[in-house]
Image (cartoon, rainbow, N blue to C red):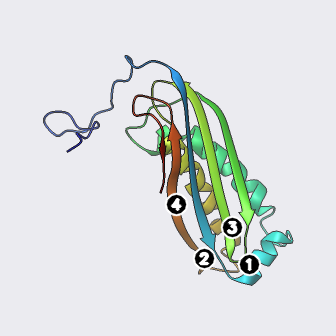
Amino acid sequence: MTRLTHLDDAGAARMVDVSGKPATLREATAEGRIAMLPATLEAIRDGAIAKGDVLAVARIAGIMAAKRTSDLIPLCHPLPLSGVDLTLELGEAGVRVTATVRTTHGTGVEMEALSAVSVALLTIYDMAKAIDRGMTIEGVRLLAKSGGRSGDWRAA
């Protein structure tokens, strides 16, 4: 069984010491979706949401979340991010958000990519909830990661 790195030998939570790890290029991509009524999707597409441009605000929120992940997830390291790309795609039944985050550091950026997606989706919900409280956030997951000691990984 794989040892949980955020627990010490006594089982107490700890922040992993990455000072001995080499700074290498690391990248992670995550995705998620928000399902909604057709009328809600149409209002977002047409820019008819009273709070403003939903996709623009969600994009900024996702980028900000990636940058602030260590403030949200207690044992995450604050990382100097090299880049955050956030894509928001309108589909037939909702919006798909994809985030790719990069750094050159001693630890990965999976949590930053997942945070970016999650907060972008929550922002869409917040901005459109006045017309559709039944929206559903779903499928938030890591798609791929590269770099570091564990190497590359891709979702099946």
For label 4, the crowd category at 10 Å Cα-Cα, with few meaning under 14, some 14 to 19 and many 20 or more, is some
Q: Please report the residue visible at 78 percent of the width from the left and 55 percent of the height from the top.
A: 56
Q: Position of residue 17 (x, y in %)?
A: 34, 24
Query: SS class of the residue under badge 4?
Result: strand
Residue occupied by mark 4: 140
Query: Residue 116 appears at what percent x and percent y?
Result: 59, 49
Counting from the top left corner in percent of width and height, residue 133 is at 61, 79
Other residues around mark 3 within 10 Å, as few (<14) / some (14–19) / many (≥20): many
Chain-order first, disc 4 or disc 2: 2
Which comes sooner in the sequence, label 2 or label 1? Answer: 1
Spatial separation of the CA atoms under disc 3 and disc 2: 11 Å
For the point 76% across and 83% down, the residue is 39
Looking at the rendered structure, the kind of residue marked 3 is Val
Q: Is residue 36 left or right of residue 140?
A: right
Question: Which mark is on residue 40?
Answer: 1
Classify 143 as above or below 50.
above
Amino acid on which disc 2 is placed = Met
Q: Residue at x 71, y 53 (%)?
A: 87
Q: Indicate the secondary structure of the residue bearing disc 2.
A: loop
> Do the CB atoms of the residues marked 2 and 1 lie less than 8 Å apart?
yes
Q: CA distance from mark 4 to mark 2?
A: 15 Å
Residue holding disc 2: 135
How far apart are labels 3 and 1 at the CA level? 11 Å
Q: Is 147 positioned to the left or the right of 149 in the image?
A: right
Q: Is residue 85 left or right of residue 75?
A: right
Return the residue nearer the eye: 113 or 61.
113
Q: Specify the label residue 95 is tagged with.
A: 3
Structural crowding at the residue carrying mark 2, measured as other residues with C-alpha within 10 Å and reported as few (<14), some (14–19) or many (≥20):
some
Distance from Cα at disc 2 to Cα at disc 1? 9 Å
Answer whether labels 3 and 2 touch (C-beta < 8 Å).
no
- For mark 3, give the secondary structure: strand
